[in-house]
Image: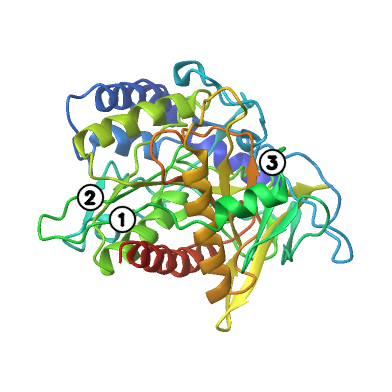
Amino acid sequence: MRNSKNARKGKLIIFLTVVAAFSFTATGVAESLMTNSAGIIPVMLSTIKDIGGISAELVLPVVSVIPGDKPDTESENISTQSEAEQSNTPETDPSTQSDINTESIIIQSEPESVVDIETFQPSFSRLITYNISNAVDDTAIYTDKDGSIENYTYTPITGDRAINLKHGQINNYTELTRDEILTICSKKPDINVEISPTNEPQVLIMHTHTTESYEPTGDGYYDEDYVGRSLSPSNSVVGVGAVIASELAEKGITVIHDGMIFDDPLYSNSYSRSYDRVKEILKEYPSIKVVLDIHRDGIEYDGVRVAPVTTINGKEAAQMMIICGCDDGTDILPDYEENLKFAAYLQSNIEERYPTLTRPMLFDYRYYNQDLTTGSLLIEIGTHANTIEQAKYTAELVGEEIATALLELSK
C-alpha cells in the first residue's frame, strides 16, 4: 500500500517540483499585493492562486495536537486545542504576534476535479465575497488507513472551571470569579445590526488559519500523510464559512466573507497578517460590527484522532466551540466584556435550540485579534477528524442561530 503511494508520488515529482517552486513565490507575492492594496480587491479567479492550488509540492504546516487522555464519559471532558490555540500569553503588539512554528512537510496533490466556483460566488445581494480560491481538491488522494478516528460527543463539564449559563456552559480559565462572569453575561450585548436598502456590511467572516481542513474519507480511518490542510474551499474552513455567510445573507444581514490565505506558504505570524487584513476591511467598511474567525480544532490521543459529533434532527453534526479572550490586566483587550456578553448570548441560544451542538465556551487569557471590534469571536467547527459534510451541517445550524441572535439584539 505504501509502495503504491510512493510510486504515485514519483510520477509527478519532476514537473511538480518546478510548479511548486513557482507557487511559493507567486502566492506570497499575491498575498503581499492584496494586503498592501489601497482598497479591497475581490480576487475570485486568480491565476497565481490556481497554480498554487495545483502544485503537488505545497509545504503546509503539520497539524500538531497535544496528546491527552482518552475521553471518558465518567469524568470531566479532556480535549486539546490545535497548536495555534495553545498559548495563554497574549501579545501586546499585533505586529509582533507569532503563531507557534510547526514542522513543514510535503503535501502531494493530484487534480481530481475543480471546485465549482459558483458555490462560492455571491448568490445573494447581501453576500460579498473576496479572495475565494478555486483550487482543485487536494485531499482526495489520502485514502490509506493508517490510524483510526473516534467519534465522541462532548457533554457538560464539571469542576471549578465550569460555569453554567441558562443553556450551555463556559469553561473558565481566567481568575475572574463565577459571580463576576455571570454578572457580565447577564447583560445584553450592545450589538445593533442594520437592515437597510444600502446593504452596508454588518458582519465579516474570515479565517486566520485558512487552510485548516477536514477528513476526506469519512470511513473511520485517517491517512497519516494527511495533516488536515487544504487550499481548496471544498474541504476547508473557507467552505464552512461560506455556509455561515449564506445563512446570514438569507436572513437579511449583509456579510463579507473573505477567503484570503494567511497560513500558506508561511504558517508563522498568521495572526499578524489577518490582523492587518481585518483592519483594512474595517477601514473600508466601518459599518461592520461583528468579526467571526472560523477555524477547526485538532484533538488526538495515542494516535487516535477524535471527531466531536452529535446528532441533530437525525443527522450527524460536528460539535463547535466558541473561544473568547479575556484581558490579562495589560489592557490588551479593553472591551473583552462586550465580546464575552456576545459569546455567552450565542452560546446559550445555540445550545437552547440544538442541545449538545456546542462544547463549553473557552474563556481564557488569549488575544486572537479580538480587540478590533466588540463583537469579535473565534469559532471552532469540528476537528480535522470530522468530515466536511458534518462541519457544513453545523455551519448551517450555527449560521441560522447567529443571524437570529443578531436580529433579536437589534430590536
Q: Amino acid at mark 3?
A: Leu
User: Which residue corresponds to mark 3?
Assistant: 176
Quick check: 310 left or right of 10?
right
User: Which residue corresponds to mark 1?
Assistant: 192
Secondary structure at badge 3 equals: loop
129 or 228: nearer the eye?
129
Secondary structure at badge 2 equals: loop
Image height check: is 151 above or below 265? below
Tell me if residue 162 can be seen.
Answer: yes
Report the coloring of the rendering.
rainbow
Q: Position of residue 167 (x, y in %)?
A: 62, 69
Q: Amino acid at mark 2?
A: Pro
What's the CA distance linking mark 3 and mark 2?
34 Å
Res 409 → quadrant: bottom left
144 or 265: nearer the eye?
265
User: Which residue corresponds to mark 2?
Assistant: 201
Q: Residues within 10 Å of mark 2 (few under 14, many from 20)?
A: many
189 or 259: nearer the eye?
189
- What number is the disc on residue 75? none
Of circles 2 and 1, the one toward us is 1
**Of label 3 and label 1, which has the lower sequence position?**
3
What's the CA distance linking mark 2 and mark 1?
12 Å
Identity of the residue drawn at 59% across and 37% down: 326
Identity of the residue drawn at 26% across and 36% down: 281
**Of label 2 and label 1, which has the lower sequence position?**
1
Secondary structure at badge 1 equals: loop
**Of label 3 and label 2, which has the lower sequence position?**
3
Of circles 3 and 2, the one toward us is 3
Query: CB of mark 2 within 8 Å of CB of mark 1?
Result: no
